[in-house]
Image (cartoon, coloured by chain):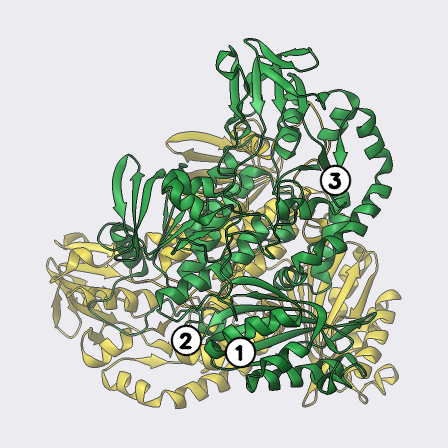
Chain colours: A yellow, B green
Amino acid sequence: MNDMTMGLKTGTPRAITESWLAAFNSALAEGDVDNAARLFATTSFWRDLIAFTWNLKTVENPDGVRDMLSATLPHLGGVRFAIADEPTQSGEIVEAWLSFETGIGRGEAYVRLRDGVAWTLLTTLTELKGYEEATGFRRPMGAEHGISKTRKSWLEKREEEVRTLGYETQPYVLIIGGGQGGIALGARMRQLGVPHIVIDKHDRPGDQWRKRYKSLCLHDPVWYDHLPYIDFPKNWPVFSPKDKVGDWLEFYTKVMEINYWSKTIAKHAEFDEATKTWRVTVVRDGQEIELRPTQLVLATGMSGKPNIPNFKGMDKFRGEQQHSSQHPGPDAYAGKKVVVIGANNSAHDICAALWEVGADVTMVQRSSTHIVRSDSLMEEALGGLYSEQAVANGVTTRKADMTFASIPYKIMHEFHIPVYEKIQQRDKEFYDALRKAGFMLDFGDDGSGLFMKYLRRGSGYYIDVGACELVINGGIKLKSGVEIEEITETGVKFVDGTELPADLIVYATGYGSMNGWAADLISQEVADKVGKVWGLGSATAKDPGPWEGEERNMWKPTQQENLWFHGGNLHQSRHYSLYLALQLKARMEGLPTPVYGLQQVHHLR
Amino acid sequence: MNDMTMGLKTGTPRAITESWLAAFNSALAEGDVDNAARLFATTSFWRDLIAFTWNLKTVENPDGVRDMLSATLPHLGGVRFAIADEPTQSGEIVEAWLSFETGIGRGEAYVRLRDGVAWTLLTTLTELKGYEEATGFRRPMGAEHGISKTRKSWLEKREEEVRTLGYETQPYVLIIGGGQGGIALGARMRQLGVPHIVIDKHDRPGDQWRKRYKSLCLHDPVWYDHLPYIDFPKNWPVFSPKDKVGDWLEFYTKVMEINYWSKTIAKHAEFDEATKTWRVTVVRDGQEIELRPTQLVLATGMSGKPNIPNFKGMDKFRGEQQHSSQHPGPDAYAGKKVVVIGANNSAHDICAALWEVGADVTMVQRSSTHIVRSDSLMEEALGGLYSEQAVANGVTTRKADMTFASIPYKIMHEFHIPVYEKIQQRDKEFYDALRKAGFMLDFGDDGSGLFMKYLRRGSGYYIDVGACELVINGGIKLKSGVEIEEITETGVKFVDGTELPADLIVYATGYGSMNGWAADLISQEVADKVGKVWGLGSATAKDPGPWEGEERNMWKPTQQENLWFHGGNLHQSRHYSLYLALQLKARMEGLPTPVYGLQQVHHLR
């Protein structure tokens, strides 16, 4: 600690925050990156969502701060922070909501101070100056008061756009995949005035959910699931049934005026280096069309690219085989013998639904699974930020998202480990019963549980909404810990010599990295250039190092110019679509967007 | 002022409110209606929305309070008020938000105290004990955690309801008319668990708006127009284009799971005195069905029953004649001669749209019209309660609705007269130009302007969004103040001997009382028994006395058992659907609902 930060340690939370902020603002105003860096603790994290870096980037420690500011400060046109809400103190940590403004835009920030210096800082850009969204005081008039012989009605203009876009005019952004990710981004594109088309293979928006197995409900609660602009109403179920989600997405797409092409498949895309635009061949309702967007967003989802295993003998099996994504639901399999290979979310849901109709169903568990009961997850892990109580406590969705985002990935597991220790105690009988049934349990490599598994690998867990009881009581048979030798003509044979007869084999074997989509759609070369999508580089199972600091390739620039990946759960689709949308808007408007710390590629898939 | 109310006059707003409330609560607890009545000023108003009276009722002065409490207090099972928000003072008036609870339900109230006694009191029931809506902390789970071989998915249950309701099972409530009124009430019925069907003649929800002339936008601003449960988003236009409203209503109908039968016409209804249910013959998509609801709601709207004039010679006219509600929009009339008879909202909108396509259009004004510019209306009249600034000031939609409802109809004009005096000054040049063009202007019989005209007669005004400029500059020709003698084969002939040739005559002559619907659907006998619908009995034009105190027959019990009227603008559809819904729910659950002060019939139409 140097002279400058002396005396910042004492006083009220507001005084401590004001002192730090005065020093920080002053250092930034003077372009003094050394002094700015000294305002960060020896171990500290600055997470920036496009406000400084035009990237999603976490830098660490004073050195990281110095490096980042040296590169970015000259482009910002000044920056100034202010306190946005009364700072609070909890233990030795003072926390404060901040607002800030740069030459480019306005943003929100959250800082945690310890010993008078920053331990964590989150900075997020929320709007571009001169390109603010037309909401609230800026909302459009709608009616054009006054009279004119040439004006067109809203409907006429909308119909003209629908008729000409993609034919006579080109979208600036093409979004491939019209689930919640594509829809949330499409809504933001509309609000920011970015010409866009979202294409999707299904008949109607929402079919991504409707077409899944009939008992499916969201495993995340409603408070976590709001889309941008329109919240689910107060009467919406906590865990929404899939068809209700589907209907909501369909009508959201309509009222938000998203340019959405259903029944449309992307066949091939290539980047034209000369014009810096994409040439994308799509088939819309049977008709082939070439689109020329500048930006291409793959929003096909983490569950977009089925991972189908390659067991010996699969070609000889005389029954039915399908990946979990192709499973039509249980109705046709009453009384049939079904083997489900896999023991994560889909496997559990599919097994339970099959049991309900009276199928003879066996789950094959090949490696350990993290299980957490839905109630416990809500009460111990999510409830503080996303629950009716949180709403009552004044935690808006935006505040919850920001708080969630403010914990650096590097230390996030430290916050989660005690939660899952508590859950293990709380649900001890349940876990013991599962183990007794032969189920292989884990809580992640470091005991950090569900969210870290999701963020690191996007797989390896089941949020229990009932299927575990069937595993425990034998309603769902379990074959665990024995490798599969081959698929025979009549079933599944294991290395221990046992064999499970099957009329149907479901491969609930998950999904591959999203750059597999880029390989299919563009080229293997581009897929390899971009590298693995998702994961933090945590050096835990299925998330090899080195440490990345942010999700690989998600919502931020990639090694392939003008190619972007978007997806994740409803929370991520809502929150990160904002930053992706602002990056796209800035490029469309020709604003300089120098990217700090573009990620390197360490893994191809 | 007696001993009891002495000393209530001084102190902080909170102290004054607390003193009054202590005395009021005590009088109510003791059933001492005399003392309760003494807490009201000599000139005072208690407006109750079903909490005490199971009626919409305003009683006046201590005598009125005494009479009402004598009749209602014995049924309430106790009542107690509490302060809900910090009381405020403005001039000599102390105002306070209150909450209260009776044996039956919970409610919200608003009181204005002057000289230590109540000048105005609004009491509103918001929920029935034991029948609270499943929202917020009570929202449904959605997913049924746990396992069961017999459970049905949300979709299966919903599909079964859709298939059987009206055929194998009967709705408790049948709502005829699926505009914003029927839809808002349908949404509340769903939330309260009341089996209901909304029937409507159009192809799709929202067609009530879509099918109107193409330039139509809402004349009320977005903050005034929210439906229950789902607000319009922040990016929604101030004055929404009609097709966008249509899409929103359709979306809302679906996601709120309203049982909505499109393409359905009610042919005949009769009340079965023996079973106390209705026998309603409807034709659904060509198929005749008999429904047996207990309650029948006519939500056909104030603009549901066209008022077609009976001019001599109408049968001889060789051109096209239509009521404004039948007008298809201007496109077919470019270059044609059109005479529009009427000078209110529809007439202006239709004339302006016809002018835009190049029709030769004349407006025939037979009596004076109240004109107010949309901007002035927003800024001077509505903005305090319904605007972006009001939202920023913390005026929620509910608070705005309650504040609006808290002004007794009897004195409401006194609040409005100065507003319209200001508007007349502000827009003097505009009004002068209109007068100079020969336009007959008024501001209501007592200068109280738009809302009072709307509440008293639902007609006689135009909110200017541009057409007045055309009247002023002659783009729309004006024929004013001369009676029509007859319709000739080729046009309209006036008593001054002039004649206007016409290819099309539009009768923008407004709509009749909603009990005209009851005559058509049920019988003239029932229509006469119920009497005129709408209006306050203000003894102003088209609203004959005696004074009623509330809108005639709207949202409250009528002289015909189990027959209800619902409608009005989006604000009223939102706000009053709550009280109508609670009245219906209480009856379905068999709660005692003794009606105090059922309105008498003074006018048949």
Circles 2 and 1, Cβ within 8 Å, touching? The answer is no
Discs 2, 3: same chain: yes
Cα gap from disc 2 to disc 1, whole angstroms: 13 Å
Mark drawn on residue A342: none
Q: Callout 3, which amino acid?
A: Val
Camera-side residue: A530 or A320?
A320
Residue located at (82% from left, 71% from top)? B92
Nearest the eye: B548 or A593:
B548
Specify the subunit that label 3 lies on. B
Q: Tell me the residue at 54%/43% (across/down).
A: B245
Q: Which residue is mark 3?
A: B372
Q: Tell which circle, 2 or 3, labels the residue nearer the N-terminal end.
A: 2
Residue at 67%, 51% in the rendered image: A135
Sequence order check: which comes first, mark 3 or mark 1? Answer: 1
Q: Give neighbour class at mark 2: few <14, some 14-19, many 20+ (Cα, 10 Å).
A: few
User: In this orientation, does residue A305 appear?
Assistant: no
Task: Label 2: state its secondary structure.
Answer: loop
Q: Is residue A323 visible?
A: yes
Chain of residue at mark 1: B
Does residue B19 lie above or below B489 as drawn?
below
Name the image quarter holding residue B527: top left
User: Horizontal placement of A290 versus A29: left or right?
Assistant: left
Read off the residue under disc 1.
Answer: B101
Closer to us: B387 or A545: B387
